[in-house]
Image: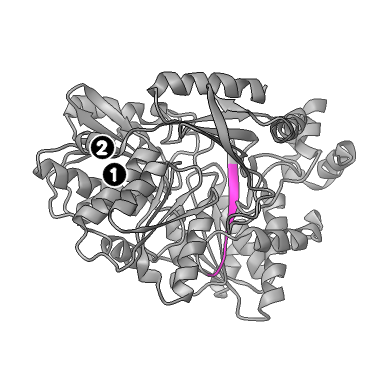
Amino acid sequence: MKDFNALYDEWLNRATEYRDELAAMSEDDRKEAFYKDLEFGTAGLRGIIGAGTNRLNTYTIGRVTDGLASYLFAHKKSDIKVAISYDSRHFSQEFARHAAAVFAARGVKAYITRELQPTPYLSFMVRKLGCDAGVMITASHNPAKFNGYKVYGADGCQVTDNAAAEIFGFIEKVKLFDVKAADFDGAVERGEIVFADVTRDYLDCVYARSIGKHRKASIVYTPLNGTGYAIVPQMFEERGFTDVKIVPEQAKPDGAFPTCPYPNPEKAEALRLAVELAEKSGADVVIGTDPDADRLGAAVKTADGYRLISGNEMGVLLIDYIFSHGKSLPENPVVVKTIVTTDLAARVAESYGAEVREVLTGFKYIGEVIKKLEDKGEAARFAFGYEESYGYLSGTYVRDKDAVVASMLVAEMTADYLAEGKTLADVLDGIYAKFGKYVHRTVSYTYEGVAGAEKMKQVLAGLRKNPPAAIDGSAVTETIDYLTQDKFDLPKSNVLSFKAADGSKLIVRPSGTEPLIKAYVTAANGGDKRVDAIIAEVEKFMR
């Protein structure tokens, strides 16, 4: 642990703009803010906004940016270009512009969006402008007190484990208060920082993934006060969806997320206002995108009210729709899913003759599969990729999940099935009737602060030492520790998987971006009651 009191004193003397915040800190506040540096990994940085080495602020943003610049120069001596975008969170634009100014001071040309834009837009921007890296200032769907710094490689994919480790090595060498930043406006005048707009090209690539014939569907949309606020309605209008209502309280960017403290479309509460508006208007479908517009949540109108569609279910629906309604499917198509995503996806995809590949949790691994296909001249084989946490991608124009293209496909899918006399719920129930129904639930266990970090380690160590022998009465027949396994061609990862004889599953992994452990529970039979029973068992491991 760092000498947090000494660091606090240094900040109090040098970080004058944070002096009032620092002066108001209690002893516990000081410890939490300074006991360590924010950790940099494949998801970049993510943390609470505020003063301190364990917080996100202009100093920690500057340090990681300077380290990233050194990494880029180690691989390319000159003419380095970086793309930058940002979401609607507090200080996102300030952090993005500060990063651009630090790059400019290091001789790296920065292309930055003039306004906030989605994460997939940034991925596209990197590729379109031929940049060497990309930076997205976002904390995705986390509460308002968080922000983050995602790093992308030249292929538009989040950096992989090896690259992240190398970048971190350069960051460690940077002295936080020694980082220089150019004057932003002056750098713009000199052409060292350039405002970039690739909206038209990006949307044209999204539209190239269109497969729907019909447009008669009434839609309620919510951007959850995030980056989808302009580009998703533009997409709906240009694709011919005229009956679109936007939740007024969530229509404009607002980093406070006043109506939705946890703006995650995985949560029913995040879509509550949208569902209420749909109930009043009789909309056919509800679509919501998270603050950086890379995840999509949805609800569909049924005779019994609005039914939320889970991430697992929406991915299965989209796979089935793409293969059953697609106009020009590739030969030997490839569908990619993460190891925690439902096995039903594989069953549906394989029924259409697709090859299914499994990767570790994180869309960067789906991007790696696309890259490998591209290197073989087979990028066209990629048909679809998704993860159960509401992230989907059709096409290879970006290398991250894209809620803009997903919103288009969900709208088209809704309209096409309505023209056939069916709702998305009807189609989903038909898939369950054909392939069987597994019930999934993801439970998160939070471990905040110093004590929490130690507890997380103890929980995972305990599971490795004493793994469960059964899952709610069904004997565990397969245990995989992805940290030590050599059976699958996958990177080492701190993930444990337990599969029971009846097909039920428990997968446990620590989050890469938040202080929590996620447990992915699958009940092969027994429905929600069985899931509840399995979770009751999981609770014993986690506490």
From the top left corner, tell me how far across and down residue 206 is, in percent.
31, 60
Left or right of residue 9, residue 214 in this image: left
User: Could you say whether the residue bearing mark 1 is in a helix, strand or loop?
Assistant: helix
Mark 2 touches mark 1? (CB < 8 Å):
yes
Percent x, y for residue 207?
Answer: 26, 61
Q: How far across and how far down the image is residue 333, in percent?
A: 34, 63
Residue 183 visible: no
To which residue does mark 1 refer?
A: 317
Horizontal and vertical percent position of residue 75: 68, 76
Q: Is residue 305 left or right of residue 436?
A: left
Based on the picture, tell me whether residue 78 belongs to the magenta stretch.
no
Question: Viewed as shown, does residue 454 lie left or right of 3?
Answer: left
- For image coordinates 20% across by 43% down, the residue present is 414
Q: Which residues are magenta?
A: 147-154
Residue on which the image places disc 2: 428
Category of crowding for the residue at label 1, using alpha-carbon neighbours closer than 10 angstroms: few (below 14), some (14–19), many (at least 20): many
